[in-house]
Amino acid sequence: MSAALVSVRDLKVNYGHIEAVKGISFDLIEGEITTLVGSNGAGKSTTLLALSGLLPKAGGEVRLDGRDVTRHAPHRLVASGLVQVAEGRAILTTMTVRENLELGAYTRKDRQHVADDLEKVFALFPRLKERLDGMAGNLSGGEQQMLAIGRALMARPRVLLLDEPSMGLAPIIVQEIFRILAEINRQGLTIFLVEQNVRQALKIAHRAYVIETGEITLSGSGKALLNDQRLIDAYLGG
């Protein structure tokens, strides 16, 4: 088995006096898709935001490639290769598709490699190339999600963090987004997927964790959890 690229140990996150994440531990294995699933309010997005440095940690440790990055600011984590696609996509609607994609590479100096990566994004998302000079705000919801993923890829992540990529999208578009995520992973990128669409997430995940009220209650391979009766009863409608 490949080594853990990211190790999270005893992570705790508080909202005021409320302990939202209660000392969870998990690993992101290099080259795999790992998913954290659970119901709304279970602590999924809170975990992701703490991992990417956007929420303070009340306790615990995060290591990237063996280095302690627990207290690193978000921009340092991005520079280290930990790049998040935000919930709700967070694209800049008054800028063009091209400008949004270029913004993803703003910390990079290797211009030729940036141009090469732009072509790789177009290979994954041909619709973005078709709309390159159009305003990002005119894209459909699915196209905006593609743009958000493409912009993150322009930062050359080592780990891609995704927060609810299926949110608000039609089922056929959700299937397309998940197909592309699987393809990106096949190309070698490690992915951490936080998702309320449990069935879709487990279908593409190598390993999975179930979080309930801030605690991990189940873990295993995506395939095993997809067939776990406890999870089926709780999330997949029997």
Image: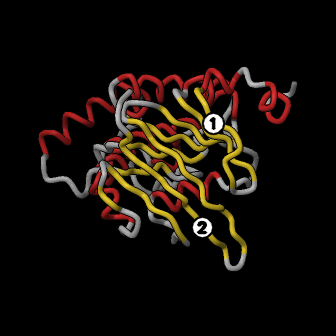
> Which corner quadrant holds the C terminus?
top right
Kind of residue at disc 2: Val
Looking at the picture, tell me which residue is in the foreground, 95 or 48.
48
Residue 214 percent location from the top left of the image: 69, 57
Looking at the picture, tell me which residue is in the foreground, 4 or 235.
4
Q: Residue at x 34, y 61 (%)?
A: 68
Residue 13: image tag: 2
Q: From what the image shows, is residue 177 above or below residue 87? A: above
228 relative position to 53: left or right: right
Residue 91 percent location from the top left of the image: 48, 53
Residue 179 percent location from the top left of the image: 52, 22
Residue 18 percent location from the top left of the image: 72, 73
Looking at the picture, tell me which residue is in the foreground, 134 or 16.
16
**Marked residue nearer the N-terminal end (1 or 2):** 2
Q: Residue at x 55, y 24 (%)?
A: 204
213 relative position to 156: left or right: right
Q: Nearer the viewer, mark 1 or mark 2?
A: 1
Q: Label 1: state its secondary structure.
A: strand
Q: CA distance from mark 1 to mark 2?
A: 20 Å
Q: Residue at x 33, y 33 (%)?
A: 121
- Pointer 1 residue: 219
Looking at the picture, tell me which residue is in the foreground, 126 or 66.
66
